Each structure stands twice: as C-alpha cells, then as structure tokens.
Image: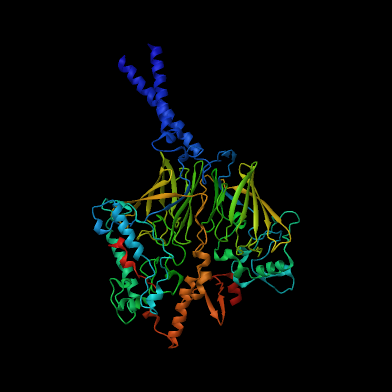
C-alpha cells in the first residue's frame, strides 16, 4: 500500500513536472516573440506603447525615385535615334543588364502635390545628379544611406524596441541607428545617418533626426539635400503587420518649403526571416579602386578616362548569329 | 485515506509547479544574489542593455614571465602601467627623413592605451593562459603565409637592417619572383605589395570588424546592447570606424544553411538563467581570426555580474587550427547612457583615401622606375611599421 502510494506520488509529480515544463516552454515561447526574426507576431505593446519590434521592409519604388515617374529603360540613358526624352535608350555603363536594368514606374511617395519643392538652383543640381548618377550616388560606393533613404531601400531592416531606446539595424552595409527616447548628448560632428531623438505622441513614435552631413541622397534619381536637413519621422501601426511611415523633410538651403513622404512598411512574415549580411564595401571595390589595379581586370585607361568594358559574347549556336554569319 | 492521498498529490503538484516556475520566473532573477531590480527588463528578461566597453588592457596570452600567475598584484599593475605609458605607441621617431620615420602613421594620439587589467591573460582555458597548440595543417599554412610575406620584403631595407618586420627572413638584394604570385590563401593581412585591392589588409579595406572582438590598440571595443521582449541587438564600435551591427536570432531556429557565410557569422542566442548564450557559426572564408576562418565556432556567454559589469566568456573552436577549444574571459564596464559615447560613425570606408592612395602611389612608383626616375619599388617597404612594438612589455 505504502509502496503503491509512493509510486503514485512519483507519477503525479512526474506528470506535474511535465505539465510545468510545457507551461514553461510556452511561457518562454511567448517571451521569444517580438525578437527580430521571431516566428510569430510580437507582444502588442511594450512599456505601454505599440511594439514595432520585428523585421520590416518597404515594398515600393521609392528607392529608384521618390517622385511619381513612368518606367524607363535604365538608370543611365542616352539619346537614341529620336531627340525625344521618352525615346532615350540605355547607356553603356548599364546596357549589359538589358531589361533587368530597367526602372519600374511608380505613383511616387511624395505627398500633397507629389513634387519635391526644390529651389531653382537646387533643381538644376538634382537634374545634373540624375545625369551623373554613376559618379555621384553614394549608394554605388556603399556609403551609408542616411535617413530617410535607409527606410525604403530594397533590403529588410529590424527594429528592436526597448523602453528607453529603439534600435534599427539595416541589412544594407550592416549599419544601424539608435533612436533615443531618453536624454543623450548629441554627436560631436555631423553624421551620415543623423542623430535620432524620439518621443511618443499617443501611439505614434515621432523621431527628430538632425546633425546630418550633406553627403547622402534620397534615392537613385539624384534627389539630395544639404547639411541643413532636418527630418521628422512618424511611425504608427496601421495593422499589427504594417507600419505607416511618414517623414517631413525640411532644408531651407535646398527646398522652398517642408515636404512629406509617406508609405507603408510591411512586416516580413517568413517564419525564419532574419537579416542576412549585405557587406557592400567589398562589392564596391572594383568600382572604386579598379582603376588603380596594376593590371585592370574589367576596365582600361584611355588617356585620362577610365573605361569599363562592356562586351556581350554571342553564345555559340545562337540562331540569329548563325544567320548573320551566312 | 483516498482523500489524504489526493491532497498530498495536489500539494506535490503545487510544490513541483512552484519549483518549476521559480526556475524561470523573473521574480527569481530579481531575487537572486546581488542582483538589483535594474538588471531585469520590464518584461522579465535579464537586462544587458547599455553602452559597454573594456576599461583595461590584458594581453591575449599570458606573458612568459608570469607563467604560473593568473592575476597581477596592484603593484605589478602599477609598474606595468608606468612602463607602458612611457613606451607603448608613443611618438618615438627614428632617424628623421628616413622611410621608417614616416612609416609610423599611428602614434599614441591614435592608439588606445588602457590601464593594465587584473588578469595576466584573456585566455582562461587552457589554464596556462596560452593558446593551445596549432594543428600541423595550420602550422603549414602559417609558415607558407610567412614565407610569402617575407619574400615580398627580402630586397628592402627592412630586411637589410634586420628590423622586426623581417623577423625570420633574410636580405636578398634581388627581388623575389613571388612578387607577382598569388598569396598561398585569400589575403587578410598587410603585405608589401599594392597591385590590387585584395593585396590590402582587411583593416586597410575597412572590413576588419570580426568576432570575437578582441581589445585592440586601434580603439573601440564599445558595444551597445538594446533588448526587446525575446530579442537582443548589439552594435559594435571598434577599430576606428570598422564597427558592425550584430543581429542575434532568439527564436530557437537552427543556424543558416552552410552556403551562407557572414563576416561576423550567424548568431543564435538563448537565455540560460541570467546568462545570454550565443552560438556563432557560418563564418566567412574571407575573414581571419588568428588563422581561423569558415570553420570557426564560438559559444559566447554574456552575464551581467553587477549593475556596472558585464562578463563575457567565449569558447573558440576550430579543429582546422587548434588542437582543442579555448576560452577567453573579458569584463565590460558600463558607460553613461546620457553621454552616449559610442560612435557608429565616422566609418572608415566613407573616408578611405589611404587605401586607394597606397595603390596609386605604387602605380606612380612603377611608372617612375620604368622611366629611370625612381628606385625599384620592390626594394621599398610600404607594409611594415614596427616602431616600438618590440618594446611592448606584454610581449615579454
């Protein structure tokens, strides 16, 4: 009897322990939510505020051009046989990409009248920037993207939201920014990514970004700013998996008035989503330093001009080529 | 009887359940020994957040003269501090106008010299504080690599004058045919040749960020930790603008597939009591840690040991390099959140004029040599800069 009593005690205890383990697991599973790369939706609120933690990505064409635009054949074009703007053709630096090098059209993300209110001089510079995109876009050199550009590049980013800091880590060039909800000293010099100080307005995270240098762009269309840039961002949840992102851009040296962009940022829903390094410094080396190699690999000097060779080798057995040969 | 049995069973269930909960409950963490409320987050996980740095210098390996000594006395630390502050990395000029004089680009203004730490070595396992023996293959790789680098120096004054940079090599006025050869493996260090970007060291290329992040004279070793419920994010400010973001996956999923390699590996973390344990694999074959590349496996243990200290222990395993795993321990000290002295910028890359200049100067030197206007570039040393290193008391 005593024996049976003890053994039933043991089995009860074992069962209870098992139940406890299951409970513990589910507790820790729940605590595991909200992590960048977590399998399911994060806890809705953290520190009494909406929890933006997770991995997000814009899904639009703003990284090509913030303004509304129609599709075009390439990022760098030249006049074709017609003198019309709409009949330009892909230019040599990007022609080898063919249709994969085309730029998708977009309804644009600039609010109100859809145009960026440049001063007359600044507009001229913007158009020049677009024409010299290859030489001037900091993205091509793997330089830090700046804010707001980092928010809508075609790479995911993660948000780790605590009570005093909101940390944003970007897949592009493994960079990050910390949004300070508490009091901090500003940076000692101007920065590429800005100095971000946040506050809550009800359930909206409002971020004041200052201390910029004049070296970042807004997109691949030459849209730019000066070191007087001031960005005010607003993050609010449209649904648990969609953030409404808005940025008001002020820069009296370049724009005639403040202007706004707005777009949704979508949660990456893949259960195993995580940031994969995109360490582009190395990817830009051939572009940046190919001209000082002892023996150039993909390019050569013609007097003072460095020329990237674009050769398209017709594969053997290509029917058109065989006809041409005949 | 039956009733009593039931009650006993319920009591047992309750006790077991309580024991079970105590083991994971935040209350338990809060109530643990010497752990203040500030060390648990609002959502009940151990709180590692803040800006952290290493406030002391400790050599990786125990200096031979401290063979059986794990800790230094206060007096020994003072003596070492005195010696190091007088010598290490100071602006010690060699004969003015010589190559070696201008080769020393980094003096004490650029280099970080911290007070000597308590430990005689970062390595705590093996207990002798020294790196375990290297495998035969690793030794062969080391030797091949050294032979190649020395060959590139053989016709220079560095070898002629038997400087530290030529240790193990001999002077030969005829430049080596290896000058136009590929290195024996993908290059990560500085060599006396600037034919290609790939000839540069990862540091010169602004790609030196690595794990584990050992204390280095080039500054940094700052980390910011930000946590959310079930998530940890770390930014490393290290190596004068070669910092990186580290994303730690905390959802229990397995490592990335083996074809994905990353500079700082793939970090997968979980909590063991109050310790954050991170398993790191998937390292890149193009990054090097003491000869260890894509076979490196780290197990890191991060523990908040007091409101102001964070213990970091990492076990490093790579059977292609060392005959056994080894462990280092470091103590990070908390820095002021308000002063916010951690810098994600300026980054090395955006201001990297030095690296293309090394290659451009090499092209100019070749052109001048071809036009009989300058010396044979193969007789010049643009790679080694060892002024003062031989005096570092940590190396004795």
Instruction: Please tell me which residue lies in front, A203 or A283.
Output: A203
* Left or right side of A237 for B250: left
- Which residue is rendered at x = 64% and y = 69% of the image? A76
Instruction: Please tell me which residue lies in front, B279 or A273.
Output: B279
Picture quarter containing residue B110? bottom left
In which quadrant is the C terminus of chain B drawn? bottom left
| Above or below for A96 versus A269 | below
| Above or below for A128 versus B97 | above
Picture quarter containing residue B36? top left
- Which residue is rendered at x = 58% and y = 61% of the image? A190
Instruction: Please tell me which residue lies in front, B194 or B162.
Output: B162
Picture quarter containing residue B60? bottom left
| Residue that extends furthest to the right in the rendered view of this protein | A113
Image x and y of residue B14, in percent: 42, 23
* Left or right side of B223 for B323: left
Image x and y of residue A302, in percent: 56, 81
Image x and y of residue B68, in percent: 23, 53
Q: How is the image coloured?
A: rainbow
Image x and y of residue B334, in percent: 44, 48
In which quadrant is the N terminus of chain B drawn? top left
| Residue that extends furthest to the bottom in the rendered view of this protein | B372
| Above or below for A148 versus A319 | above
Residue B325 visible in this rendered orientation of the protein: no
């Amino acid at each position: 009897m005593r024996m049976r009593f003890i053994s039933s005690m043991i089995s009860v205890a074992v069962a209870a322990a098992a139940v406890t383990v299951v409970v513990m697991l589910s507790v820790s599973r729940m605590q595991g939510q909200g992590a960048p790369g977590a399998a399911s939706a994060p806890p809705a609120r953290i520190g009494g505020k909406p929890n933006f933690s997770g991995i997000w990505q814009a899904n639009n064409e703003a990284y090509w051009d913030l303004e509304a635009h129609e599709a075009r054949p390439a990022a760098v074009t030249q006049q074709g046989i017609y003198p019309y703007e709409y009949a330009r053709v892909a230019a040599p630096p990007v022609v080898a990409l063919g249709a994969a090098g085309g730029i998708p059209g977009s309804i644009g993300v600039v609010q109100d009248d859809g145009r960026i209110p440049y001063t007359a001089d600044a507009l001229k510079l913007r158009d020049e920037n677009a024409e010299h995109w290859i030489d001037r876009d900091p993205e091509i050199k793997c330089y830090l993207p700046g804010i707001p550009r980092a928010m809508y590049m075609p790479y995911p980013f993660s948000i780790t939201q605590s009570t005093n800091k909101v940390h944003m880590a970007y897949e592009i060039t493994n960079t990050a920014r910390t949004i300070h909800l508490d009091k901090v000293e500003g940076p000692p010099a101007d920065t590429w990514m800005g100095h971000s100080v946040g506050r809550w307005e009800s359930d909206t995270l409002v971020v004041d970004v200052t201390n910029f240098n004049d070296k970042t762009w807004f997109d691949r269309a030459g849209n730019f700013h000066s070191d007087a840039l001031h960005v005010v961002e607003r993050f609010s949840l449209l649904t648990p998996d969609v953030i409404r992102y808005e940025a008001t851009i002020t820069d009296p040296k370049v724009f005639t008035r403040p202007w706004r962009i707005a777009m949704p940022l979508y949660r990456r829903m893949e259960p195993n989503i995580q940031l994969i390094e995109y360490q582009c410094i190395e990817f830009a080396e051939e572009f940046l330093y190919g001209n000082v190699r002892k023996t150039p690999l993909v390019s050569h000097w013609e007097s003072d001009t460095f020329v990237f060779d674009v050769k398209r080798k017709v594969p053997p057995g290509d029917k058109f080529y065989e006809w041409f040969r005949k | 009887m039956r009733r009593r049995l039931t009650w006993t069973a319920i009591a047992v269930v309750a006790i077991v359940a309580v024991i079970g909960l105590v083991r994971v409950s935040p209350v338990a963490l809060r109530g643990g020994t010497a752990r203040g409320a500030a060390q648990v987050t609002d959502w009940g996980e151990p709180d590692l957040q803040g800006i952290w740095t290493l406030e002391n210098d400790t050599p990786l390996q125990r200096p031979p003269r401290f063979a059986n000594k794990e800790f230094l006395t206060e007096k020994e630390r003072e003596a070492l501090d005195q010696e190091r502050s007088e010598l290490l990395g100071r602006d010690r000029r060699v004969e003015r106008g010589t190559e070696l004089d201008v080769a020393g680009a980094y003096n004490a203004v650029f280099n970080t010299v911290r007070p000597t730490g308590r430990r005689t070595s970062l390595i705590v396992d093996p207990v002798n504080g020294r790196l375990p023996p290297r495998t035969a293959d690793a030794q062969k790789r080391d030797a091949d690599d050294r032979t190649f680098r020395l060959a590139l120096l053989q016709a220079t004054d560095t070898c002629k004058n038997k400087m530290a940079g030529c240790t193990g090599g001999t002077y030969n006025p005829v430049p080596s045919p290896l000058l136009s050869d590929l290195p024996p493996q993908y290059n990560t260090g500085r060599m006396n040749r600037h034919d290609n970007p790939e000839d540069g060291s990862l540091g010169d290329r602004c790609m030196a960020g690595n794990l584990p992040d050992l204390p280095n004279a080039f500054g940094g070793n700052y980390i910011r930790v930000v946590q959310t419920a079930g998530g940890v994010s770390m930014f490393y400010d290290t190596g004068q603008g070669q910092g990186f973001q580290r994303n730690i996956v905390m959802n229990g999923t397995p490592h990335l597939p083996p074809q994905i390699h990353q500079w700082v590996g793939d970090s997968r973390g979980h909590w063991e009591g109050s310790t954050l344990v991170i398993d790191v694999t998937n390292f890149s074959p193009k990054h090097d840690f003491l000869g260890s590349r894509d076979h490196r496996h780290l197990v890191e243990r991060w523990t908040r040991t007091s409101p102001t200290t964070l213990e970091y222990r990492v076990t490093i395993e790579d059977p292609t390099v060392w005959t056994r795993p080894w462990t280092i321990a470091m103590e990070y000290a908390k820095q002021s959140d308000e002063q916010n002295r951690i810098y994600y910028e300026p980054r090395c890359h955006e201001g990297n004029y030095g690296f293309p200049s090394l290659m451009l100067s090499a092209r100019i030197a070749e052109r001048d040599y071809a036009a009989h206007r300058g010396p044979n570039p193969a007789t010049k040393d643009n790679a080694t800069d060892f002024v003062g290193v031989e005096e570092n008391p940590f190396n004795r």
